Amino acid sequence: MSNSLIAQIQELFEQQKYREVSNIVNSNLEGVESANERKEMLLFSAQSNYFLSRNKQALEDILSCKKLLSEVSSTTEETINVEIQRAKILRRLGEKEKSLHIYDKILKVHQENLDEDTKATIYHNLANLYLEKGTFEQSKTLFEQAIEIDKRNKNEKGLAQSFSGLGGLFFYLGEYDQAIDYYGRSLKIRSKNKDLVGEATILFNLGSTYANMLSEKNALSYLTKAEKIFRKLGHQKGEHTVLDTKARMYYNLKNYASVIKNLRYLQTISAKSITSQNLPMVILLIDSLLQNGESLKADKITDKALEAAKTFDEEKKKLHISEIANLMHLKSQYLFKNEKYESSLNVLEELEKLATLFHDDKSLIAIHFSKSQILYVMGSLSKAKELAQSGFKLSSKHKDPTSIAFLDLLFGIDWKQSNFSECIVSAKELSQYVQINRKPVLDTIIRTLQLAENERHIKSHSREHNLLFEETHIPLFYLDLLSTIYSSKLTLSKLERLVINFKSRNPAAEAQLSPYFLLMLNLIQIEQEEREKFLPSLQNESKLHSLLSRIARKQVLTEDIRENIERIRSQKIVSLHTQMLNLDIIYYSIILGFISKKYLFDFKWSTIVEENQKELVKIKQNLMISFLKDEQEDVRGFEDNISYKNAKLLYGKITQNLFNKIESSNVETKLLLQGIVADLVVRIISLINSGELSGPKTEEAY
């Protein structure tokens, strides 16, 4: 009966029905008395479990088989075969040095007893090991030696394996055309010999190669065929590997819905089933769910993965610290987005202990950044700055790209505290990292901040300077207003809070800004009664401001606007502040349909502004004209756009790409923002260019 059982197992093995082989051996092994037959059964079982990627079970089988070899009479050929199988399994388990040692020993001790096919097998397996170690030339030489022997002996099975190995070598080198060629040669042989597992493996390798090239159509063609064969063979590990490769490709293509679809088998996974091997794919699924707006599902899987990670031994934790850190960051971000700031910090505290234990500086850098961000949002600016500074030192030490993010954060913290001297330090540090064409932006920011830092000195320097400063300067915290407008939908309550904030910080500035508040109010859809309640909180500084305010309320006659424009034009000279405000009146009057665009295009800035201020008015006029160009392409007489470009560059950093935000806004908000930008850019430039703003410290800005 035992002989017939061995024959049955052998037949199933040759038919590549590895799962059935494993099941029969498990069910019948204990009832077989013959040590020789048990040895044969265990060898078949070890090889079957190896093909099924049950590597730990395969190792147990082969070690039991090796033990029986010493109890029965065995040939040298049998001993060598068992040792080769053991080396293959150890390689799969990551024990590469042990595997190398076994092959070296076989070549050294049994050189004379090795037939050519066995030599070719060993060369092939050694080539794979050297490939994984990154020793590509040695790997290539060994593959070629194996191919030479197999060609000589017409060993198609060996040729198919070595062609596949060379395909893998060229894949790792990024030479995909060569990889596809060798995989194709291997596939031709395996298909001919009906080697289903080998065929599925090569189809998978071809699919992976095309996936790396982001050639979706070709990748899916091969991967789908591989998936079908693996499913037919009951090879779940192979099937999941195909799905993982599809998911990675779709992730790189930012097709997150398809990532989720292919990783469906992981969505209901239990914590016990999450291993160190599938952890990277679990994280890929979590991130894709987040990108797809399914944060609740992502959080549930994150909790399971963190629970699984707690069961890892210290060695595994150390090996997978980056994945565990990623999970804990995802958890902290979920809590942060749900405004559970303390809980988010607690998760990061746990992660910090783990990273410190394993001296994982890369994770510590990310932790410091996340913690400082949360503290910044919570308003704990001193603690946030302390963490950001330590994180910046650590990232600089390791030349980590997060250094730029830390400097950005430090800039924001100091900006919020009006600590402009420290802002300058951060901006100067940032200038080391930015591209050459962005350096003028930072240089301009540094100059502006230097002047802002000198504000008290300038104001106290003399009454004349004080008046000039107030006349040309909108306060830097005006940026808070812009941020509020483009980051969220403007409501009456938000506008009221802004007004109260401005009044408490600088009543004079609030008075200057009142027309702009009124323009915003005009765009908010509210009842007239509520509007009237809000209006008294705004002040009017002059007749010009009053006119702009009435334009905002749409309580003005076209004749009034024209009369005002003509009155300004008739004057020989007007102040810079008046001229800027007059441009606002013209611009908003055009937007609201009171007058035509020609009033802006024909604005005679050259005759009524002092010589040293002409450029500033021209910049603002060009800006406004550029905002209206959508409707009138041919605007003559303004070919010089250099000043406009410089003004736009200035704004690049300070307002966090506000110009890009403008493009995605609705029409009303877009027009409003454009007008505000025009005003703010010019008024900041006026601080830089005005020769009147001088003082002992001002020179440092240049």
Image (tube, rainbow, N blue to C red):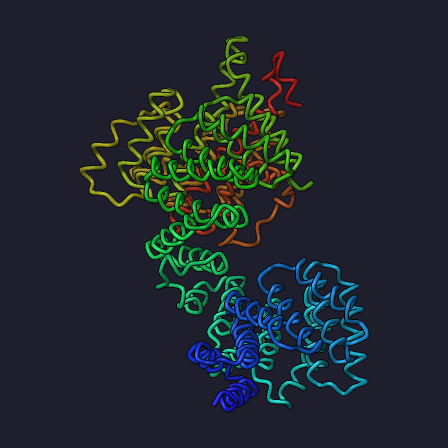
The residue lying at 72 percent from left, 68 percent from top is 170
Q: Does residue 230 sit above or below 514 in this rendering?
A: below
Please name whichever residue, 37 or 376, is drawn nearer the observer in this view of the structure: 37
Q: Which quarter of the rendered picture does the C terminus lie within?
A: top right
Nearest the eye: 223 or 102: 102
From the viewer's perspective, is 441 left or right of 277?
Answer: right
Residue occupying the point 51% across, 33% down: 409
Image coords of residue 119 (percent x, y) = 76, 75
In depth, the one of 150 and 98 nearer the eye is 98
Q: Quadrant of residue 594?
A: top left
Picture residue at 60% right of the left edge, 27% below the top: 446
To which quarter of the image does residue 42 belong? bottom right
Residue 217 visible, this orientation: no
Give the x, y percent position of residue 551. Answer: 34, 37
**Residue that protrudes farthest toward the left in the picture:** 529
Image location of residue 300, percent across then percent down: 34, 54
Residue located at (37% from left, 62% from top): 269
